[in-house]
Amino acid sequence: MYGLTDTGRKREQNEDCIALVPEAGLVIVADGMGGHQAGEVASKLAVDSIAKYVVDSFIDSAKAPNPALEIKSVGEAVQQANRAIYELSRQRPECAGMGSTVVTVVFYDDKLCVGHVGDSRLYRFRFGILEQITQDHSVIQELVSRGLATEEEARESVSKNLVTRALGIDPAVLPDISEHNVMDEDIYLLCSDGLNDVLADGDIEMILTEHGRSLQTAAQTMVETANARGGPDNISVILVRTGQNFLRHKEALLKGQKADEEI
């Protein structure tokens, strides 16, 4: 796993937030929205809340295995993050109206579970071909899905960043949760729209083809390329290369929990 987040060239603050928890097979990208740095608060709250909930559920499962653990944990974690952001936005006037997109992925055995809300994305790069796994919750995506706009028109649309779902806007949210099989040497990309709004899928595919042996180089090249093209938004990238039968490091999770308790 390798992750990178960058403010970009036009924004003063970075309202994206990312998390990588290798021992849990967990990665998260969130893109906040809201004035007075409230977007930064929302995205960090989303990431922190989801990470804690998922890791805690995995620690509990070491004592009592749950066959549907990943799907259940991801769905509940996203719902809890939504409630946390919504409640804080109502308690603090400076946070009113804040929200966040999120894409959360858990890798386990030969599968992954992804939960997402908004237009942060998950892609898969397999056999040299890039494929978008998630579908944006956005106005323009609804038009594309209904055949009222093309993918090319969507990329140029002034309304391409208008999301139809986000964490913290309403008391409850409906995340899309799905499970997928993984293969050896797949590369998975999580990103905020600051990347895919600037780099077309073909650009990302080319970078992974040329630099995919080094996740760090590939991620840095994506961010540098987006910035070279103006960097109009915050840019976040997480890359994960998979192997078969990933096993959680339960001892590392338990050790981390003990350290938190001692703090």
Image (cartoon, grey):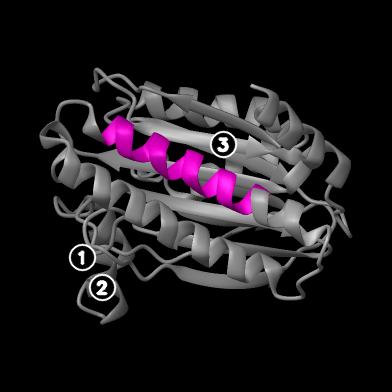
* Depth order, front residue of 165/24: 24
Dominant secondary structure of the residues highlighted in magenta in the image? helix
**Number of residues whose C-alpha sits closer than 10 Å to that of mark 2, classed few (under 14), some (14–19) or many (20 or more):** some
Residue farthest to the left, as pictured = 93
Left or right placement of residue 62 versus residue 55 in this view: right
Q: Position of residue 125 (x, y in %)?
A: 66, 54
Mark found first going from the N terminus, 3 or 2: 3
Marking on residue 19: 3
- The residue under label 1 is which amino acid type? Val
- The residue under label 2 is which amino acid type? Glu
Left or right placement of residue 222 versus residue 195 in this view: right
Does the stretch in magenta take in 15? Answer: no
- Label pair 1/3, CB-CB below 8 angstroms: no
- Label pair 2/1, CB-CB below 8 angstroms: yes
Residue at 73%, 27% (x, y): give it: 259
- The residue under label 3 is which amino acid type? Ala
Q: For the residue labelled by badge 1, is the local secondary structure a helix, a strand or a loop? A: helix
Q: Position of residue 4 (x, y in %)?
A: 54, 27
Circle 1 or circle 3, nearest the eye: 3
> Which residue range is magenta in the image?
39-55
> Which residue bears the numbered disc 1?
139
Residue at 18%, 41% (x, y): give it: 91
> Which residue bears the numbered disc 2?
142
In the image, is residue 40 above or below residue 149? above
